[in-house]
Image (cartoon, coloured by chain):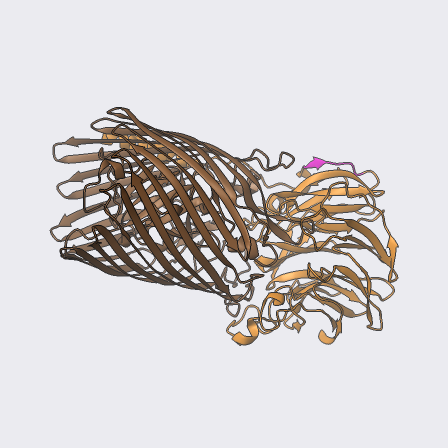
Amino acid sequence: MKKASLLLLTGIVAFAACQDPLFPEKPSIDSDLKGEVVDVNGLSGFKKLFVLNEGQMGANNASLDMLRISDSNYITGVFKKMNPTEGAGLGDVGNDIVVVGDELWIAVNNSGIVEVLSAKDETEIAAVQVPMPRCLAYDDNYVYVSSWNGAVAVYGSDWSVDVEKSKNPKGAVYRIDRKTKKLDEGTVEVGYQPEGLAVSSGKLYVANSGGVASSLPPAYSYDKSVSVIDTKSFKAEKTIEVEINLQKVFADSKGNVYVSTFGNYYSVHSGLWQIKANGSASKVADYASYVAFRDDTVYCIGNENEFDYYSAPSTVTWTCKNGSKEAWSIHLDGVNPYALAALPGGSFVIADAGNYVNPGSVSLFTDGAKKWTVSAGVCPGHFAIW
Amino acid sequence: MLLTVSWSLSAQEADTLVASRVSSVRSVPVTRPAEEATLDGLQPLAADAVRRFTGVQLKDYGGVGGLKTVNVRSLGSEHVGVFIGGIQVDNAQNMQVDLGRFSTESFSSVALYNGHKSRRLQTAKEYASGAALYLEPAVPQKSGWRIRARGGSFLTAGAAFRRDKIWKNLRLSYSAEGLYSGGRYPYNFFGETLMRENSDIRSLRVEGRLDGKLAGGDWNLMMYSYGSERGFPGPVIRRAAGFPFSAERQADQDAFLQGGWRSADSGPYSAAVRFKLADNYTHYDAHAEKNPMAMPYDLHFRQRSAYLSVAQSFSINDRWSADLSADGQRNVLEADRDYSVPPERTTLTTVLAGRYTGERLRAAAHILWQGAWDGGILRDAWMPSASVHWEPLSWLELETFASRSCRLPSFNDLYYVAIGNVNLKPEYASQYGLDLRAHGKHFAARVSPYYNRVTDKIVAIPTSTQFRWSMINIGLVDITGVDSRLEADATFGGIRLEGTLRYTFQRALDHSDPGKQTYGLQIPYAPVHSGSAILRGEWKGWKLEWETSVTGHRWSATSNSADYYLAPWSVSDVSLGKSFGLLSAALRASNIFNTQYQLVKGYPMPGASVMLNLELSL
């Protein structure tokens, strides 16, 4: 009986040992990648639309999708397929993506990495270490990275710093040389939990959210400032008081800077603010949870019901040009937005994060109506166009 | 070397109050435990004994210090009541009981009941959970000392002593145990061997217990204190070189005092009074100064609870009895942030239960009402249940039960800033189970098919504003499964062999929303197939045990796609023990084939390890 049992045990062990690769994914070259074929008629002015899926925090499942206009394929999981040697994939929580020339720059927040890929074939050029990178902007020489890391806890060296300060550290802006992909030694301290940033006439405008500070002592409050950094000296120049919980920043060609806020979800509405070239800030309008920018125009989607979480949203869509609110009509058709982007040629893409844990979707809107929806990665949240 | 006692013919149980006397027919539980094990202290944590039970999924974050919660038949761990000496261990903050905090040193046995035990003079809360796990404290049987020491891989070392003293009408025992584990173990990360860091733990447990007789009944008093300081190693993700995964530390100090008195059950009326006072303190610090990737959180929590239970039982004769029990409890949570209001709760649980206990047929039914007042809002629920146990032949037992139970929303569900929802209803579990058991002189078999439905499941979903999540009663899960177990023993000359095979089949499907892509898919972390084989041999005081457990593939999210796939795994453990008079020694090798696996995605489990246990009894 002992023998029989041992045989059985061996059998179980052997059975369990041969782990079946249910999902073989072979490394591939870019042009071999295939996905869902969608209708790209009417899309022009770009070769690829990249979609950064944030993934779920701690699950290491940030991923990159792309829509390739040349053969109408919407392809998911592009980073893993094109970079099989990066076994761990893109990393944990993709937070921003921009196209810089022919390069794709991705901030992977919880991995502490700014990933630089070739926009031509999505292969890795460099992985730059930045603590808690949030959002990206660039000028001719540098890519700027907003970071939640305290300005005092210097990356890569000794982390034993003043505990009192680091318990609720202010954020910082780092810069990476576009050519060498090296992190510049200097950093600029900004406000609490900086988010979006944009360059306008040699100045870098950084939106400070205070999203973490709002739940920490001593103040338990959001930040409400925009930090202005001179890009030549890479030094803080001034701060402009705007509104709490600031998020995205866009700069138009006329010297206007637009900043969006999420509000506080119960008494302060989300909205869009304008900072004029002279530094004065004024509110454009309420309700701007999801914003996008194209040709000096900010496109906004908001919810007039945003304090009442349990009732259906009352969606409002509008635009802002030269600081004034204008009507904009787009029929969301059941899509619950998580991110919005304006494509060259007049179309829009909207990401729906679903339940955040399972894969979300991306929909194309042309002439104010939904054209198609494709399945994306987990929590699609950021777009870039090449 | 946990010896299952599940097919011992006399339906005795290791209840603290009856261990010292023979239980009469009328005080036996109506149902049989689904699984039962004596704890011999070979493994340090009670969780290690529970993980092999059929129908149980242990969620384990790895290492001695990793959180270990138990989920029975996919109801969710919030539906599993954990009872120490019949009194529930609860956690109103998140409804999760960490079995990793309970040492095998403290308890003599552990038993799992699907549905309810239905025994006379239970507390009302024993009727209120979907499944019940009973940890029975060891009651002194003779005066003496026991000293244990253990040490092994990953810099794990522990020492414990226990003193038992018996007088005529009083039994005293007190014990203490210290445990340290460095927790540094290697694991494979995409072809690279890394070391688990910041997963060390230090813990100290001090415990005392008195059992006595008073006014014709039995009383007991138990004091328990557990303190620990540990690191949380964090999920394994892609992270820039030089940054740690985590520098998070947590310090806990748990203490409780519980006890009760129970009258003799010889007359037509008997009663029991029980109480518990508990205080649990937690300090969590993300140590942002050591980890620039951390959110700068430094949090303190203190939970306090007071509990009183009165149980009464009326018996007409040896076969028929009726119980009326009522429990009252007050829970308060203090925290320096994160809650929109100071969480507090008053709970009243009452139950009316009737039972028939014949020689071959036993039956029970109860109706329970539970009401919880959270800051003036009353949430209440009715929970009915019925069970029948029948032994038509001397070698055959049939059991069936149907039950509806609920779990209350936790303080986190209700009040957690940004996602809490004070309008939550309780979450319900409906269960229908059948249990067939057959036994011969040298074998025993059990097959137990079941169907469960979890409704109004509390899940976090994004609200109309996607950046704001909320807890909502929206989930619906249908679970069908079979638990099975086959045991046999044989003796050849001086060699005694025992074998146990277990197999669990389980389909737990998400039926929340037919419009969603996840409709009809297997819920996270529930394997369809799992099982284990154990072989034990004894020869002239030597004991050898081999165990292999196998778990089929699982998904870490309801979307059953490649990104969420968790590969099947198999782990084998071997132990060898020998007694030398007062001294006994055991060597245990765990995961001998060094399997790399994860129970929770991102949390690698330890590979091969050894542990030496020495025990001295005086």
Residue B549's image quarter? top left
The residue under the point 73% across, 39% down is A373
Q: Please provide percent x and percent y for residue B569.
A: 42, 40
The residue under the point 41% across, 61% down is B280
Q: Please provide percent x and percent y for residue B329.
A: 42, 55
Whether the magenta-drawn stretch holds residue B361 is answered as no
Q: Please provide percent x and percent y for residue B334.
A: 49, 64
Q: Nearer the viewer, residue B227 or B487?
A: B227
Q: Nearer the viewer, residue B486 or B164?
A: B164
Q: Look at the image and tell me whether residue B345 can be seen.
A: yes
**Magenta span:** A35-40
Q: Nearer the viewer, residue B471 or A59?
A: B471
Chain that is brown in the image: B
Residue A24's image quarter? top right
**Which quarter of the image is occupied by the N terminus of chain B?**
top left
Question: Above or below — where is A383 with respect to A152?
Answer: above
Q: Look at the image and tell me whether residue B608 can be seen.
A: no
Question: Above or below — where is B434 with respect to A226?
Answer: above
- A305 lies left or right of B460: right
Chain that is orange in the image: A
Q: Please provide percent x and percent y for residue A126.
A: 63, 57
**Which quarter of the image is occupied by the C terminus of chain B?**
bottom left
Q: Nearer the viewer, residue B190 or A235?
A: A235
Whether the magenta-drawn stretch holds residue A36 is answered as yes
The residue under the point 63% across, 43% down is A359
Q: Give the dominant element type of the magenta stretch: helix, strand or loop.
A: loop
- B76 lies left or right of B592: right
Question: Above or below — where is A152 with respect to A302?
Answer: below
Q: How many marks?
A: 0
